[in-house]
């Protein structure tokens, strides 16, 4: 028996995964936004009423859900050789080891416009299963306009949700939407309707599927969503919003972050990770006993665009968690440290998807049997 990835095609229709020896798969489902990104880079952001020229302008596929899905693929596969035409699936990074192949499935919503078709093609070129991506005739796909300061790498993002909000809660009446084979993990962000996210997490938990929530962009969620949530990955501003604080109220000390993570642990979250930019991340799985993971050192002159760092962190964290579970060596610290390392690579290039590293960029390639 052979395993053939979804969306087989030939000729000019798109990439084809060649048949490989059958092996067990670990399936990760991402339910999230699929956006078209428009990125302007300038030495600084304009003040109110001010106009000046940017240094560059780029359009490319994005969306927090789609970015995470592509990060999952890249961070479990070997970077294709230079000159590869993209028609053959990249090699699974850990082929020949005890680890299972990782298959990524995307659930989302796009319009039938040019942007929507380009975004779907980008996912499929990374061998992400797009059977769960709904195409709405006449709808406008989501668009994210990003301004990046070249001096600091900091960014501001304005999103028009478009078709993202057409994926409704009733699409998740049961776990059938996740696929015929139960996934190892369901990941979601908040670019979809809040009610949709709450429903899909509720259904995943009822089916005893592990869940990861990246609550971005942050807004209020019912407390029951947190109860039984496996992983909560959020940044400083999201931590402030979801705990009812102003960002200025957050301290920088160890005890301050313990207070924040303890609130989510009290609500029933199993693992809480707060990303802290160039300070790394704070993580906790037991009240009052959180820890820091240092960020990988990056030369300030190398920082180009930080907008994809969070999505890369989520993808890297999920891949490492699945790998370590399979090996029976699960460590929250090593998983967070791996995610910090991957996200540091992302900020050195413009764009949320093309900047995502491959597993072979910083892991030794494991030999085939």
Image (cartoon, rainbow, N blue to C red):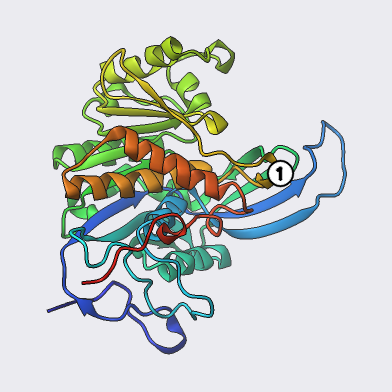
- Residue 322: x and y in percent read 25, 48
Q: Is residue 157 visible?
A: yes
**Residue at point 31%, 42% (across, down):** 169
**Residue at point 65%, 42% (across, down):** 299
Q: Nearer the viewer, residue 278 or 32?
A: 278
Q: Quadrant of residue 105?
A: bottom left
Quadrant assignment for the N terminus: bottom left
Local crowd at mark 1 within 10 Å, few (<14), some, or many (≥20)? few
Quadrant assignment for the C terminus: bottom left
- Residue 219: x and y in percent read 46, 28
In the image, taking residue 256 as reference, residue 99 lies left or right, namely: left
Eyeballing the image, is 243 above or below 169? above
**Residue at point 36%, 43% (across, down):** 317
Q: Quadrant of residue 301?
A: top right
Q: Is residue 161 visible?
A: no
Q: Nearer the viewer, residue 205 or 321?
A: 321
In the image, taking residue 279 as reference, residue 7 lies left or right, namely: left
**Most distant residue in the left direction:** 1
Eyeballing the image, is 141 above or below 215? below
**Residue at point 38%, 87% (across, down):** 10
Q: Quadrant of residue 16?
A: bottom left
- Residue 323: x and y in percent read 25, 50
Residue bearing the label numbered 1: 301
In the image, taking residue 127 as reference, residue 296 lies left or right, namely: right
* Secondary element at image label 1: helix
């Amino acid at each position: 028996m052979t395993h053939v990835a979804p969306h087989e095609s030939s000729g000019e229709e798109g990439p084809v995964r060649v048949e490989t020896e059958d092996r067990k798969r670990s399936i990760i489902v991402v339910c999230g936004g699929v956006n078209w990104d428009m990125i302007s880079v300038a030495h600084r952001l304009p003040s109110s009423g001010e106009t000046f020229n940017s240094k560059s302008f780029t359009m490319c596929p994005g969306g927090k859900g789609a970015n995470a899905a592509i990060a999952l693929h890249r961070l479990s596969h070997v970077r294709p050789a230079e000159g590869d035409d993209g028609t053959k699936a990249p090699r699974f990074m850990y082929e020949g080891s005890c680890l299972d192949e990782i298959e990524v499935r995307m659930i989302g919503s796009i319009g039938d416009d040019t942007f929507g078709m380009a975004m779907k093609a980008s996912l499929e070129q990374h061998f992400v299963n797009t059977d769960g991506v709904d195409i709405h005739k006449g709808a406008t796909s989501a668009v994210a306009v990003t301004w990046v300061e070249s001096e600091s790498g900091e960014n501001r993002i304005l999103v028009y949700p478009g078709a993202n909000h057409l994926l409704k809660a009733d699409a998740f009446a049961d776990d059938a939407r996740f696929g015929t084979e139960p996934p190892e993990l369901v990941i979601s962000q908040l670019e979809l309707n809040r009610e949709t996210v709450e429903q899909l997490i509720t259904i995943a938990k009822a089916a005893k599927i592990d869940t990861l929530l990246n609550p971005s962009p942050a807004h209020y969620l019912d407390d029951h969503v947190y109860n039984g949530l496996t992983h909560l990955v959020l940044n400083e501003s999201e931590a402030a919003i979801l705990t009812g604080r102003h960002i200025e109220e957050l301290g920088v000390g160890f005890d301050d972050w313990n207070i924040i993570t303890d609130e989510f642990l009290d609500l029933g979250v199993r693992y809480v990770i707060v990303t802290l930019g160039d300070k790394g991340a704070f993580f906790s799985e037991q009240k009052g006993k959180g820890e820091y993971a240092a960020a990988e050192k990056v030369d300030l002159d190398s920082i180009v665009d930080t907008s994809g760092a969070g999505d890369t962190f989520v993808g890297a964290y999920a891949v490492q968690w699945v790998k370590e579970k399979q090996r029976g060596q699960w460590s929250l610290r090593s998983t967070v440290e791996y995610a910090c390392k991957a996200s540091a690579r992302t900020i050195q290039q413009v764009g949320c998807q093309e900047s995502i590293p491959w597993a072979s960029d910083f892991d030794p390639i494991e030999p085939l049997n």
